Amino acid sequence: MKKAIIFDLDGTLLNTIKDINVSINKTLEYFGYKKLNIKKTKANVGYGSKELVRKVLPKNTTPDVRLKATNHYLETYSKVSGTYAKPYRGIMKLLETLKTSGYKLAVVSNKDDHLVSLLNEQLFENIFEITKGVKKGVERKPHPQMIKETLKALNVTKDEAIYVGDTEVDIRTAKNAFLDVVAVTWGFRSLEELVPLKPNYIIKKPKQLLAQLNYLNENGGNLVKSN
């Protein structure tokens, strides 16, 4: 039986793409590069801030400039974060229902750790028992380190938890940690992009997660496989 739900943050719980797009474009503009539209920004997110900057800069960018651009982006994003971000429709109701039903809730994200904690406080009123983001000495997803640490902190086994995310990074993370994974289509990847990755299940609306958990409670089985 599943006792804990671990969520990705950006693209799963929060629509943060405008915050990210504004911040990365300020950085690109500062260094004299062409700005990105929302679609291209979405295509490059998922692996964390440093990787986002690396991907959008020209391939011949020197390490020194890349470092300066990364620092500029991090500083800019820390100021912009939360300005435009908001939970996706149905997410708050889902979280409240899960919480009152007794599920343990956590977030594991490739966003910087202090920003994950801040957003949990500001936008979710600390509904999550555990939040983990990238910081010194911590491997970012798809490495399973943060997932394993979260399971230990929640006092649940890998068989008692599921991971919910919206990108290939999240699916790989869950599989690396041997967790069942639910992929969502309202985030930064389309249904067509998610299907080949073979998550255990794909949902189009938050309330469908509740249906899956109810099925588990009633039947004691595994997640229904995605088509």
Image (cartoon, rainbow, N blue to C red):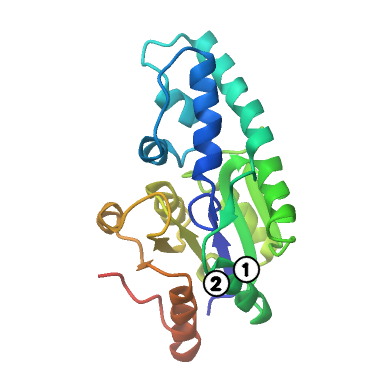
**Which amino acid type corresponds to the residue marked 2 in the rendered image?**
Glu
Q: Is residue 117 left or right of residue 185?
A: right
Q: Are marks 1 and 2 in contact (CB under 8 Å)?
A: yes
Q: With respect to residue 221, does 140 lie above or below?
A: above
Circle 2 Cα neighbour tier, 10 Å, few/some/many (<14 / 14–19 / ≥20): some
Quadrant where the image shows the C terminus: bottom left
Q: In this picture, is 60 found above or below 24?
A: above
Q: Which mark is residue 179?
A: none
Q: Nearer the viewer, residue 84 or 62?
A: 84
| Residue 160 image label | 2
User: Which secondary structure lies at badge 1?
Assistant: loop
* Above or below, comparing residue 52 to residue 10 in the picture: above
- Which is more toward the observer, 21 or 170? 21
The answer to whether 68 appears left or right of 225 in the picture is: right
Residue under label 1, please give it: 156
Q: Position of residue 140 (x, y in %)?
A: 54, 40
Quarter occupied by residue 33: top left
- Judged from the image, the secondary structure of the residue bearing numbered disc 2 is helix
In space, the residues marked 1 and 2 are separated at their CA atoms by 6 Å
User: Horizontal placement of 210 versus 188: left or right?
Assistant: right
Q: Position of residue 120 (x, y in %)?
A: 69, 55
Type of the residue with mark 1:
Val
